[in-house]
Amino acid sequence: MAQDTSNILAPARGATYAKNSPAGVDTGLEVNNHGDLLMAEALPPRTELARMGCMWTCSIPTASAFTYVAAWPTTRAEIVLYNPAAAGGVSLVITSAWLYGITSMAAAQPMTLIGQLVPVVATVPADNAAVLARSRNGKRNYNGIAIRAIANTTAGQTTNLWDVLATSLVPAPTTNLGAAVFADLYGGYVVPPQGVFALNAVAGTAAGTAIIGVTWAEVLLTLG
């Protein structure tokens, strides 16, 4: 079968600002003086997901703050997100997670946030109504599907499958109330239907309490 070749031509932009066309007017492509096609994101990263109302954040309630563990965790996760969708349903796209100390550890300590993606849950966790999900675009109520649970040991976490997500590179000072770490995960974890995303934290000594939070988007994806 014969193939047609099309050459796409576009005007080169010189040393001028980008044009400002009125609404409803058709505009063409532009290139720079080197012939590179000019493209730009319409909105900052994640704004479109937030705008559509499918991005959410939750965290461990302060009343349920956990004590840091001073050893590599085995099966316990301090907070988990479970995806109860049926096969072919929406996925949970993890965009960020954070760790915050709400009581002092009374000594200079490193802090590390770790996470684990479990593709097939061992035991479905019970939804904890105290773990509130809040919208990233101001929606009043959570209408997504994710099940949130804390202090979980039965969803299927495995000792040697934890990933280091973020760490305090400089040990927190002695008066370390409020010490925190943040992990921008850029959607690098996709929790499939029937999977779970688990989070925990490690410090130098098992002292002081902390909470963990996580932000995700619920998106229908074709998974490889």
Image: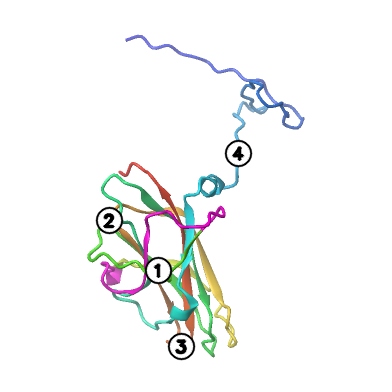
Note whether 128 is above or below 14 in the view shown: below
* Within-10-Å neighbours for mark 4: few <14, some 14–19, many 20+: few
Q: Distance between the residues labelled 2 and 3?
A: 34 Å
The residue at 73%/29% (across/down) is 20
The reply to whether residue 64 is visible in this rendering is yes
* Within-10-Å neighbours for mark 2: few <14, some 14–19, many 20+: some
State which quarter of the image contains the N terminus.
top left
Q: Earlier in the sequence, mark 4 or mark 1?
A: 4
**Kind of residue indicated by mark 4:** Ala
Kindly report which numbered mark, 2 or 1, lies closer to the viewer in this rendering: 1
**Image marks 4 and 2: residues in contact by CB distance under 8 Å:** no
Q: Which of marks 4 and 3 is nearer the N terminus?
A: 4
Q: Distance between the residues labelled 2 and 1?
A: 20 Å
Q: How far apart are marks 4 and 2 (CA)?
A: 34 Å
Q: Residue 42 carries which label?
A: 4
Residue closest to the far front: 140
**Kind of residue indicated by mark 2:** Gln
Kindly report which numbered mark, 4 or 1, lies closer to the viewer in this rendering: 1
Disc 2 marks which residue?
194
**Kind of residue indicated by mark 1:** Ala
Note whether 127 is above or below 108 in the view shown: above
Residue 30 x, y percent position in the rendering: 64, 25
Q: Is the magenta stretch mostly helix, strand or loop?
A: loop
Disc 1 marks which residue?
129
**Kind of residue indicated by mark 3:** Ala
